[in-house]
Image (cartoon, rainbow, N blue to C red):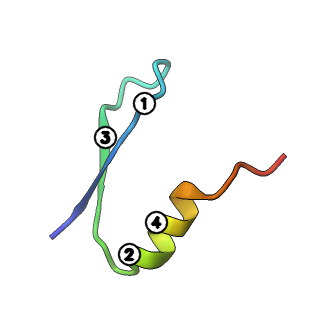
Amino acid sequence: PVVRIEITDEADRTPYWLTPPGRPEQLAAALTAPARS
């Protein structure tokens, strides 16, 4: 199984990433965390 992550950046031609869900909780936390400045 893989996780499909949709890319919504209009400057990025890649429509999505596919990645194995080795640590799904950590992946979800990383993707939903606020950006660091």
Please report the residue visible at 39 percent of the width from the left and 36 percent of the height from the top.
7
Q: Is residue 28 above or below residue 12?
A: below
Which circle's residue, 1 or 3, is located before the other in the chain? 1
**Residue 24 location, x and y as percent?**
38, 75
Which residue in the structure is indicated by mark 2? 24
Callout 3, which amino acid?
Answer: Tyr
Q: CA distance from mark 3 to mark 4?
A: 15 Å
SS class of the residue under badge 1? loop
Which residue in the structure is indicated by mark 1? 8
Looking at the rendered image, the disc whose residue lies closer to the viewer, 3 or 4, is 4
Which circle's residue, 3 or 4, is located before the other in the chain? 3
**Residue 29 location, x and y as percent?**
54, 68
Please report the residue visible at 84 percent of the width from the left and 46 percent of the height from the top.
37
Looking at the rendered image, the disc whose residue lies closer to the viewer, 2 or 3, is 2
- Mark 4 is surrounded, within 10 Å at the Cα level, by few (under 14), some (14 to 19) or many (20 or more) other residues, namely few
SS class of the residue under badge 4? helix
Nearer-the-camera pick, 28 or 20 = 28
